[in-house]
Image (spheres, rainbow, N blue to C red):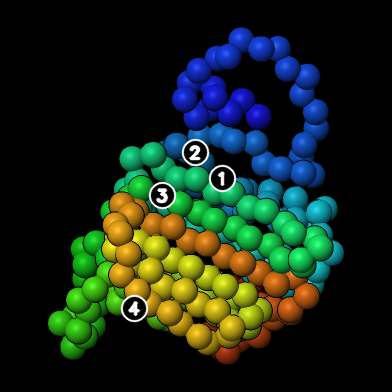
Amino acid sequence: MDFFTTLFGVDIGITQCRYDCSNRLMELKKKLKGQNPNEDSQIAEHFKHIFQSQIKGDSNILEAVSYSIGEIVDNTIRHSLSPINGFICAQTYRNKRKLEICIADCGIGIPKSLKSSNNIDPSERDCLVYDHEYILYALRKGISSKYGKGHTGEGLFFSSEFIKENYGRMKIISGKGLCLIKNGNDVLQMDIDCWTGTIVALEFQLDNEVNVKNIFDREFPMDSTEDFDWI
């Protein structure tokens, strides 16, 4: 996997016999700003391909996973201002019938990003004091610190809706705040020691259906078909 070379630039000088791992894992590599923007969606599709080969589950779960990864990776690479870009890892548990994904960066974090975007309702600005309150605010529909076509930038909102329907878990850590969604609509908020950046951890239950199209239909009935085709 060229772990030390990719991460630290160190050649350990060992000749390795390389195997085809395309159906098992994604090798570690650097993702640099300024590269092909389509690479973000390619990363999501690669993960989706791996999951399809590793597990048997509802196909809509894979669509939900692909969308969530693509949106959050885009946030990490292009909008977090992270000096190290970011890291993504995932693991399937076939016996426990679950899939876990974690994406982390060392950027400015959700609270600072929202404050600088002027995308907070003036009537609620004074009510947001703690970082976990900003994280919860970022999970609302229509809240984004970036601008683009359609519903670009609402990845956290849709990811949280997928998790709720799936009865999975979604944990977001940013700044000094933590938000945890579990058991459908249960939301836990708390203060933590500071993490400079953002961590998003997703846990999908493989045997619980996620109807991606229905969620888009429900939230944006007039143009949901166009958005769904984009996934």
| Residue at (80, 28) in percent of width and height | 19
The mark nearer the N terminus, 1 or 2, is: 2
Could you say where residue 206 lies in the image, as x and y percent from the top left? Answer: 75, 70
**Which amino acid type is marked by label 3?**
Asp
Task: Point out the image quarter for the N terminus.
Answer: top right
Q: Do the residues bearing badges 1 and 2 touch, measured as CB atoms within 8 Å?
A: yes
Tag 2 residue: 31
Element type at marker 3? strand
Tag 3 residue: 105
How far is disc 1 from disc 2 in space, using C-alphas? Answer: 9 Å
Q: Name the front one of labels 2 and 3.
A: 3
Q: Is residue 152 left or right of residue 115?
A: right
The mark nearer the N terminus, 3 or 4, is: 3
**Which amino acid type is marked by label 4?**
Tyr
Mark 1 closeness class: few <14, some 14–19, many ≥20 residues within 10 Å:
some
Tag 4 residue: 137
Q: Check residue 39 in the rendering and tell me which mark sits there, or answer none.
A: 1
**Which amino acid type is marked by label 1?**
Glu
Element type at marker 4? helix
How far is disc 1 from disc 4 in space, using C-alphas? Answer: 29 Å
